[in-house]
Amino acid sequence: RTHPLFDLFQSVSLKYTIQKKRSLLPKYGLSCEDVFIISKLAPLGHGTRTEYIDLYLVHWPGVEGLHPGDSRHSEYRAQSWATLEFYASRQFRAIGVSNYNAKHIRELLMSCRVPPVVLQIECQPKLIQRELRDLCIETGIHFQAYSSLGTGALLREPEVMDIVRSCGRTPAQVLLRWAVQQGISNAQVFDFQLSEMDIMRSDALNCGNKVL
C-alpha cells in the first residue's frame, strides 16, 4: 500500500528526513512500510547517528573544507563507508553513494566489506555518464539518475524541441522517456517510445557538462 504523494521520500538532511517521517506519515495514515525513505550523509554530517532509513547514501565523495586535491579525502571516504557498513542491516536497509566518479567507485570496491547498492548521480543527454553506467553494470551497482531535465535548461534545447515536434510530447516527457529507455529511470512515461533516431539525436548532445 502506498500513498500517491509519498511512495518515495528523499532529503539530503538526515534531521529533516527524520522530522518529516515522524510528522507526515501519521498525518496521512502511513507507516514506514508504506514508503521508501532515502537520506544522505552530507559533507559535514560524518559521525551522525540515526534511526531506521531504507537507503542511506554518502552524498559527496569530498569533505567540506578540504582542498579538492587533499589526499585525506580518500581516507575520510573509507572511514565514512566503514561507519555505514556498521549500521547497515541495523538501521539502514541499504547503503550507497552519490556523486562518485569511476575512480571513487573502484577505490571503494577495493576496500569495502559491503558494496554500495546504488550510485545516484546526475545523468541527462548532455552528461550521459557512459563509463559510470558500464562500471555499475559490471559491478552490480544500481545506477540512479537525477536532474534528468537538466534543472530545466534542457527543456529549451533545440534538438529536444525538434523531437518534441516529431512525437507530439512535452519536453519533460521526452527527456524522462530518454532516461527510461536508457534504463536509468523508472518514471511513469510508458505510453510512447522514442525512435532509435531520436535516442541517437539525444545522445549526440553529450558534452560532459554538469548542470549542478
Image (cartoon, helix red, strand yellow):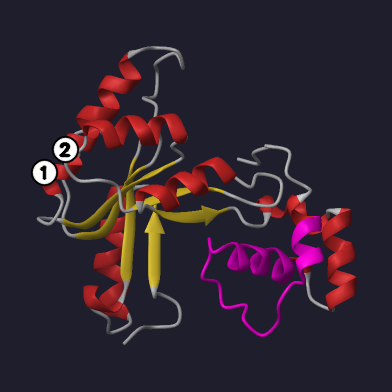
| Residue ID at (32%, 73%) | 35
Q: Residues within 10 Å of mark 1 (few under 14, many from 20)?
A: few
Of residues 155 and 207, the one nearer the viewer is 207
Q: Which residues are magenta?
A: 172-201
- Residue 76 place in picture, x, y as percent: 27, 24
Of residues 151 and 23, the one nearer the viewer is 151
Of residues 92 and 183, the one nearer the viewer is 183
Q: Residues within 10 Å of mark 2 (few under 14, many from 20)?
A: some
- Report the Cα–Cα distance between label 1 and label 2: 5 Å
Q: Is residue 105 above or below residue 37?
A: above
- Residue 14 place in picture, x, y as percent: 29, 49
Q: Is residue 104 left or right of residue 48?
A: right
Q: Is residue 190 left or right of residue 88?
A: right
- Residue 44 place in picture, x, y as percent: 32, 31
Q: Is residue 212 left or right of residue 199?
A: left
Asked if the magenta segment contains residue 8, the reply would be no
Label 2 residue SS: helix
Amino acid type, callout 2: Thr
Disc sitting over residue 109 in the figure: none
Asked if the magenta segment contains residue 200, the reply would be yes
Q: Which residue is mark 2?
A: 83
Is there any visible trace of residue 116 in the rendered image?
yes
